[in-house]
Amino acid sequence: MKTTGGSDVAKRRAGKQAAEEVEDGFVVGLGTGSTTAHAIEAIGEAVREGLDVRAIPTSFQSRQLALEVSIPLTTLDAVDAVDLAIDGADRVLDDPDSSADGTLIKGGGGAHTREKLVDAAADRFVVVADPSKLTDRLEAPIPLEVLPDAHSVVAEEVHDLDGDPTLRAAEAKDGPVVTDNGNLVLDCEFGPIADPDGLATRLSAIPGVVEHGLFVDLADTTYVGTTDGLEVLEH
Ligand code: 5RP
């Protein structure tokens, strides 16, 4: 699994807390990443103790882990509703005075397209994070999943928005990262993002962009695990 910063103890605490929200009969969206993995493991433990759930994974990684821990799986088109989605984030805007509080930057694992689909479909979306993800100013690069044929024209459009795109390179293969959907990822620096909603709208409008990693007005609650406790942020 891709490793990110932050303490594993803190991530486990957040993941386990989110898993506590899963009730008998729930359909649960399973996000991707090292923090969500702790939630998936905890849900698996509860399933082995008799909890009845069906889960919708958002990536090859979360599907594999869910299978390993014996969580029954389903798909978005086979259910009437998703009760709860649990997912990690690369950045969480923590600024209660801002209307954009709770905006996320996701896609560090290149799974944000399916994550957004499932997180947005859920009645409740809970983010699991460690303190390194919290920020009072959004300025990390925004991942764009793009159709392979579109990467150069999308890059030009990003330049026109004063962004600086970089094609994400694979680490254990020559060439670019290829997502679970067969697409490429452009990581786009925009500097400080004062208007995430406006930028999200402009990015969505670029032909060839499958999905961007700005999650605006989707998260309900963030569980922030720490090495000795847990903080709950309501958005
Ligand atoms: C994958 C994601 C992840 O949720 C994000 O990268 C956080 O990962 P981690 O919990 O490993 O820090 O958006 O696309």
Image: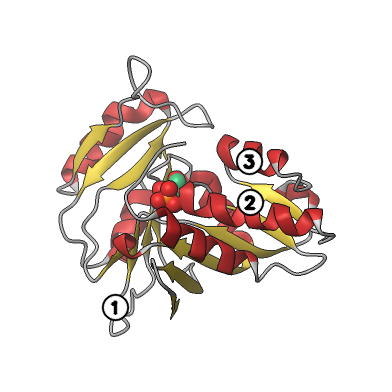
CA separation in Å, label 2 and label 1? 31 Å
Q: Nearer the viewer, residue 55 or 21?
A: 21
Where residue 108 sits, quadrant-wise, is top left
Label located before the other in sequence (1 or 3): 3
Which residue is pictured at 49% across the width and 74% down the height?
A: 221
Number of residue marks? 3
Q: Callout 2 environment at 10 Å: few (<14), some (14 to 19), or many (20+)?
A: many
CA separation in Å, label 1 and label 3? 33 Å
Circle number at residue 65: 3
- Residue 17: percent from left, percent from top: 57, 69
Which three-letter amino acid code belongs to the residue tagged 1?
Asp
| Residue at the extreme front of the image, as rendered | 228
Label located before the other in sequence (2 or 1): 2
Q: Is residue 57 left or right of residue 126?
A: right
Circle number at residue 41: 2
Label located before the other in sequence (2 or 3): 2
Q: Is residue 233 above or below residue 182?
A: below
Provide the secondary structure element on which disc 3 rests: helix
- Residue 94: percent from left, percent from top: 31, 74
- Residue 6: percent from left, percent from top: 34, 54
Q: Is residue 52 above or below residue 141?
A: below
For label 2, being within 8 Å of ligand 1 is answered: no
| Residue at the extreme top of the image, as rendered | 174
Pointers 2 and 3 in contact (C-beta within 8 Å): yes
Q: Nearer the viewer, residue 49 or 34?
A: 49
Which three-letter amino acid code belongs to the residue tagged 3?
Leu
Q: For mark 1, what is the residue?
A: 95
Q: Callout 1 environment at 10 Å: few (<14), some (14 to 19), or many (20+)?
A: some
Instruction: Name the image quarter holding the C terminus.
Output: bottom left
